[in-house]
Image (spheres, helix red, strand yellow):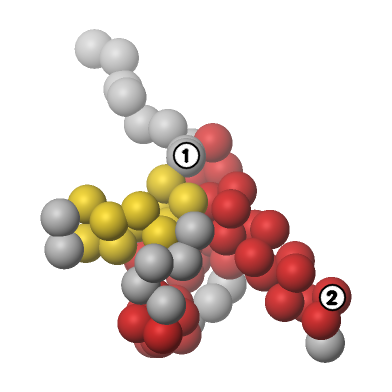
Amino acid sequence: MESNCIPIWEKYVLSVQEAASYFHIGEKKLRKLISEDPTAEFILWNGSRPQIKRKVFEQFVDRKLTAI
């Protein structure tokens, strides 16, 4: 039987837990970012569950780092 596991670095959207692991950011920090701007372009809502758009969040992080 073939596994349908997609590597985390190839996924379009990540759960908060996956994003925290992938970006080395705490889950609390991610949830704070989500609560501060629930309409942010890097968030895809699946019902009441936020999903993080990986590439868009990477761009968001890059912009924040260059602003420092």
User: From the viewer's perspective, is residue 50 above or below residue 26?
Assistant: above
Q: In percent of the image, x 81 and y 81: which residue is there? A: 67
Q: Position of residue 5 (x, y in %)?
A: 36, 31
Q: Secondary structure at mark 1?
A: loop
Percent coordinates x, y for residue 49 in the rendering: 21, 62
Describe residue 22's horizontal placement relative to residue 60 as left or right. Answer: left
Quarter of the image holding residue 64?
A: bottom right
Q: Is residue 27 visible?
A: no
9 and 55: which one is in front?
A: 55
Q: Earlier in the sequence, mark 2 or mark 1?
A: 1
> Element under label 2?
helix
Depth check, front residue: 28 or 32: 32
Image check: 14 left or right of 22?
left
Residue 48 located left or right of residue 27 = left
Spatial CA distance of label 2 from label 1 is 25 Å
**Farthest top residue in view:** 1
**Amino acid type of disc 2?**
Thr
Mark 2, residue position: 66
Residue 2 in the image, given as x and y percentages of width and height:
30, 14
Looking at the image, residue 15 lies above or below residue 7? below
List the residue tagged with mark 1.
11
